[in-house]
Amino acid sequence: MKKLIGLVGTNSTASTNRQLLQFMQQHFSERAEIELVEIKALPVFNKPESKELPESVKALAEKIEAADGVMISTPEYNHSAPAVLINALNWLSYGIYPFVDKPVMITGASYGTLGSSRAQMHLRQILDAPELKARIMPSSEFLLSHSLQAFDDENKLVSKEKIEKLEGLFEDFLTFVDIINQLNHAHEINKKEAENFSWERV
Amino acid sequence: MSKMNIVGIVGSNAEVSYNRTLLQYIKRQFQGMFNLELVEIKDVPMFNQSDDQTDSQEIQSIHHKILQADGVIIATPEHNHTIPAALKSLLEWLSFKVHSFEEKPVMIVGASYYDQGSSRAQMHLRQILNAPGVNAIVMPGNEFLLGKVKEAFNEEGNLIDHETIVFLGSCLAKFTQFIQMVLAMEAAEQSEPEPEDLYATGKIDTTIEGVDMDADDWLEQAAEAVNAVEGNTYVKLDRGLLTVDQLNYFLSSMPMELTYADSNNQFLYYNHTLPGSEMLASRVLGQVGNPLANCHPKAAFKNVEWVIQQLRSGAVDAVRVNVPTHGPDKYVVHNYQAMHDKEGNYVGINEYILDFKPIIDWYLKQTGQTLAGGVEVDGMTGASVKEADKHVEAVSGASAKEDAVEVSVDAMSGASAKG
């Protein structure tokens, strides 16, 4: 069974994005082992000259490194991903490169109608940066709008259509993970490029 | 305007930042243009909506600096194709419980080690500043992207390339113009006229208290309350002496329908020309004394208010609206004429409703002229329908007609010239 990481894209105590990942963890427990990770404890990234990484960052990087794929669920703050998620990705691309060639699926939930659509678009662009270079599942979008009304008391998605859509995307993601594992010819080179990458030498 | 005060946000919390160098350079080099105060973000905690720290000293200090500034320049690096987490965190705090950037002019600049010059981060920053909670007014165009920044400054921290300096100066000069433009826009918003009290709940010197304005016999009750004179009693006017009866004969024979509304928006008088149903604009005795709100359908309140605001503020002396519902044989115009006391204070509206058609016909007959184009009725009502649609056009539309219908307009434009 594949091991996946569900990265909660917020530090908020109450979060429908966390709820969504918890639902997926339970709903797909027969299909994959999903571990949820939080990013609240990471310090504010400040590009330390020493390149010394906090323990919390190292631990998170190891989990991602070991996983077959990562699912990130993001809220939308001011048309973009939350600072705390950008912060985690800043750390996870600073001298370490756990995301290079890592299959990633993006989901998102929002209280309003748009379901974090703009944040997801930004997140795709961010994950495409040279030091992250994740393999983001293309042509897939899971936007959970009106998320406060989306779950029942047992934390199950209420909408049948939403569940079907999520099931379809999740199966696709498992297939996507397999495909990406076959697209491994350039992986070592990609990794090296990311490691050797330096904006100062571009 | 005195020298502008601008806040420059260093969009990086790193020890070494060329975006800081860039802002420091702008502060020195362009000190003749504006005062620039640099703001650092390194002590700003990570935004967390479950742990509100809006009241912390760090956030309050930046919030107040931005509030007091004429404009803000944000210098952003690019991390992972977007702005740094620390800058995003600041923007989240400043759009959560407080809204520091609301309608604040903002300029974006950015420096990067590589040749992109933070282009993607700047694009994201624009989108972020556009979000409803932030609502900054970001200057369009004038992108300042400083690529290969390690080679861009000399040891004193001054930009080396002459063309870059000139371009930066022109962007900054445009930003000061942009700020003035935004200020002018906001000033225009602030000079919005006061809302009109169409229900006449206020009170002026002549308001008769203790009588229900809505009462059908308001006239009788109010006359009694103030011991009003009538009949053969003489009234001394500023240019003559008439009895009340004579005043009535005089006003009733006016070839137009007159209505008096005072500055408290109370309808006090109309001249009795014809029975209500035969009037150009029907009036009945029971309406006298009503607040203006009772004399108009709710849907018309906005336009009524606009007309009164124009007259009360003195923006115009008169507003004219053609009402085309009387058919092609009439050209009925509602004229709202401001009335003033000797000191020039607004005291109310003289609304006179007049059919211009007989006047125009008489004029044409007397002078032997005809209307150019020979489509007098269509030409005129066509133009007027538009007017009735929108109160604004009622005023400005007058000049358009002058070109379209030459002769008939002469008679009217004399009247409109005042408006």
Image: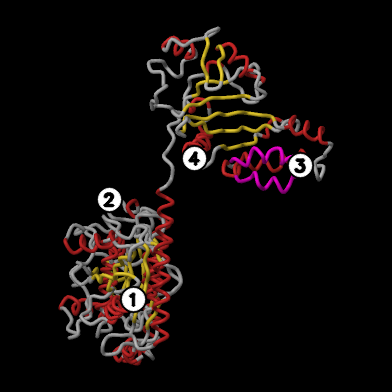
The magenta stretch spans which residues? B396-419
- Identified by mark 4, the residue type is Gly
Q: Which secondary structure, mark 3?
A: helix
| Relative height, residue B165 to residue A114 (above, below) | below
| Relative height, residue A104 to residue B316 (above, below) | below
| Image quadrant occupied by the N terminus of chain B | bottom left
The answer to whether the residue labelled 1 contacts the one labelled 3, judged by CB atoms less than 8 Å apart, is no
Measure the alpha-carbon separation of dots 3 and 2. Answer: 78 Å
Quadrant of the image occupied by residue B320? top right
Residue A157 appears left or right of B389: left
Residue drawn at x 78%, y 40% is: B376
Identify the residue under disc 2. A153
Whether callout 3 and callout 2 share a subunit is answered no
First in sequence, mark 1 or 3: give its number.
1
- Identified by mark 2, the residue type is Asp
Whether callout 3 and callout 4 share a subunit is answered yes
